[in-house]
Amino acid sequence: MKRFVYADNAATTQVSKPVLDAMLPYLSEQYGNPSSLYQFGQTAKSAVEHAREQVAAALGAESNEIYFTSGGSESDNWAIKGIAELLAPKGKKHIITTKFEHHAVLHTAQHLEKQGFEITYLDVHSDGLVRVEE
């Protein structure tokens, strides 16, 4: 009998049973908008804040340092744009990346290029490495 092995966990991953059990009430019954002012949403907000505290504790961080995003592409975009906008006023507008990046990184770099940033796209060689001298 052949066993199926899912090997694309970078794109999506099965949710573990404990996580699914913890999330089910917020996917089916307590799905209020946590940004709203009404009680249904505030119940959801309380759950989000509790999750934020749990993640912060697990990472040794402060809860106000934890942000939840919809996935990797949003996270890439947000991190790159955030640091670019932070450092641009200091004259730091040169970003180095590779031609082999995920489209979330490349599209963000292209957007920043249109905003006046200098972007260097390094080649990735047949051994999978970039060359420092480049």
Image: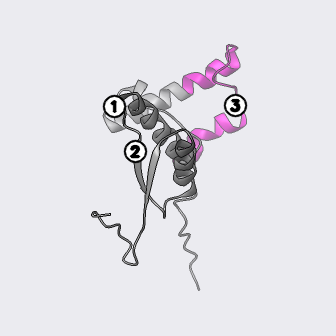
- Marks 3/1: CA distance? 27 Å
Task: Tell me which amino acid carries mark 3.
Answer: Tyr
- Name which residue type carries label 2: His
Select label 3 or label 1 by which is in front: 1
- Viewer can see residue 55: yes
| Numbered circles on residues, count | 3
Q: Residue 39: x, y in percent? A: 68, 15
Q: Main secondary structure of the magenta part?
A: helix
Q: Of 61 and 21, which appears nearest the observer?
A: 61
Q: Which region of the structure is painted magenta?
A: 18-47
User: How far from the left and from the top, in percent, is residue 55?
Assistant: 42, 36
Q: Secondary structure at mark 2?
A: strand
Q: Which residue is mark 2?
A: 94
Q: Nearer the viewer, residue 41 or 11?
A: 11
Left or right placement of residue 54 versus residue 32 in this view: left
Earlier residue among tags 3 and 2: 3
The residue that appears at 68% across and 38% down in the rendered structure is 27
Q: On the rendered image, what quadrant is the C terminus found in?
A: bottom left
Residue on which the image places disc 1:
61
